[in-house]
Image: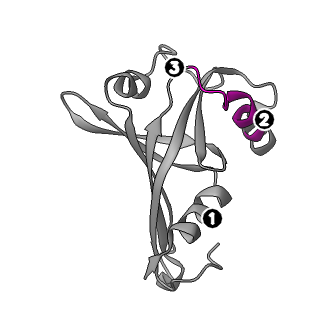
Amino acid sequence: MSLSEAESLDLLHAHNHGVLGTVHAERGVDMTPIVYATQGKVLGSPIDRVKLKSSLRLQRARNLEADVRATVLVEHWDPVDWSKLWWVRAELRWLGDDSPHGEALSDRLAASFEQYRDAPFASILTFEIVRTTGWSATGSRSIT
């Protein structure tokens, strides 16, 4: 059953990880698992110094410089009880490198993840949440 935009947004706020889709000019959609924090209609995902990377200039950031549109997908799967299935998709617009929301999102990420307590961020990709849609097997707001 379709979830309302408010129900979808509530689920997005209640969770902290999903899959980010950005647009690569040649390959099309690039998908990356991310952690995130939200505040109102803003979502932030860190580019951190915690996990090993060959560079802090990640492909997702380069994709956003060329096309500010992105999507994040959050979902819950239960292989036994399909009445617990749900997903939320948030359409996003990257706000650029100078977003005023970085500090608040950094604080929220530090509160959610022990690894981020010292805010080891190279940057935080900040997005406006343009629209949310969702579906659940029960159509219920009480989804966990």
Badge 2: how crowded within 10 Å, few (<14), some, or many (20+)? some
How packed mark 3 is, by other alpha carbons closer than 10 Å (few <14, some 14-19, many 20 or more), is few
Amino acid bearing label 2: Asp
Cα–Cα span, label 3 and label 2:
23 Å
Residue at (65, 79) in percent of width and height: 142
N-terminal of the pair, mark 3 or mark 2, is 3
Name the quarter where the N terminus is drawn: bottom left
Residue type, label 1: Asp
Query: Circle 3 is placed at which residue position?
Result: 53
Q: Is residue 36 magenta?
A: no
- Give how far across and how far down residue 77 sits, in percent: 49, 69
SS class, disc 2: helix
Q: Is residue 56 above or below residue 125?
A: above
Magenta region, residue range: 98-108
Q: Residue 89 location in percent, x, y?
A: 44, 58
Closer to the observer: label 1 or label 3? 1
Amino acid type for the residue under numbered disc 3? Lys
Q: Is residue 104 magenta?
A: yes
Q: CA distance from mark 1 to mark 3?
A: 32 Å
The image quadrant of residue 121 is top right
Which residue, given by chain and number where applicable, does mark 1 sit on?
A: 10
The tag earlier along the polypeptide, 1 or 2, is: 1
Q: Which residue is mark 2?
A: 107
Tag 1–tag 3 contact (CB < 8 Å): no
Main SS of residues in magenta:
helix
The quadrant the C terminus occupies is bottom right
Residue at the far left: name it: 26
Between circles 3 and 2, the one closer to the viewer is 2
Secondary element at image label 3: loop
Indicate the secondary structure of the residue bearing disc 1. Answer: helix
